[in-house]
Image: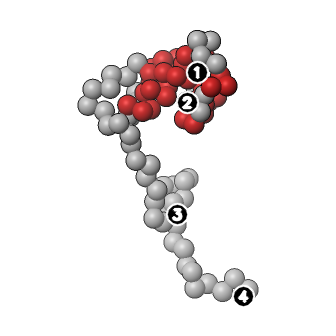
């Protein structure tokens, strides 16, 4: 899977270096640490080798303004006026 941003590509490169033993695992922070724990060497290599030309520096995290049912991908209606004691 290719990286979506320059920072994601860089974090994958750092995590890959740790998987190869070229960097200490204890030095990892944030995204590179979670990538190290959750991705294989091949996945990290694929992401780290993504060309960064025309990639944004960072991709903003998208947070929905309404809850979404992850099983269907549809909005979940939230009724704030419902009496919980009824």
Label for residue 67? Answer: 3
In the rendered image, residue 37, in percent from the top left (x then y), is placed at 64, 28
Q: Are marks 2 and 1 in contact (CB under 8 Å)?
A: no
Can residue 67 be seen in the rendering of this structure? yes
- The label nearer to you, 4 versus 2, is 2
In the rendered image, residue 55, in percent from the top left (x then y), is placed at 31, 33
N-terminal-most mark, 4 or 3:
3
The residue identified by callout 4 is: 86
At x 54%, y 19%, the residue is 16
The residues tagged by marks 2 and 1 sit, at their Cα atoms, a distance apart of 13 Å
At x 39%, y 42%, the residue is 59
The residues tagged by marks 1 and 3 sit, at their Cα atoms, a distance apart of 32 Å
Instruction: Identify the image quadrant of residue 39.
Output: top right
The residues tagged by marks 2 and 3 sit, at their Cα atoms, a distance apart of 28 Å
The residue identified by callout 1 is: 40
N-terminal-most mark, 1 or 4:
1
For the residue carrying disc 2, how many other residues have a C-alpha within 10 Å: few (<14), some (14-19), or many (20+)?
Answer: many
N-terminal-most mark, 4 or 2:
2
Q: Are marks 1 and 4 in contact (CB under 8 Å)?
A: no
- The label nearer to you, 2 versus 3, is 2
Q: Are marks 4 and 2 in contact (CB under 8 Å)?
A: no
Instruction: Identify the image quadrant of residue 32.
Output: top right
Q: Quadrant for the C terminus, please.
A: bottom right
**Relative to 7, residue 79 above or below:** below
């Amino acid at each position: 899977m290719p990286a979506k941003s320059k920072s994601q590509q860089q974090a994958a490169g750092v995590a890959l270096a740790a998987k190869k033993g070229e960097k200490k695992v204890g030095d990892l922070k944030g995204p590179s640490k979670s990538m190290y724990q959750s991705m294989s060497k091949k996945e990290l290599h694929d992401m780290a080798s993504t060309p960064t030309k025309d990639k944004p520096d960072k991709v903003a995290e998208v947070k929905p303004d309404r809850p979404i049912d992850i099983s269907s991908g549809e909005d979940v209606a939230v009724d704030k006026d419902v009496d919980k004691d009824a």
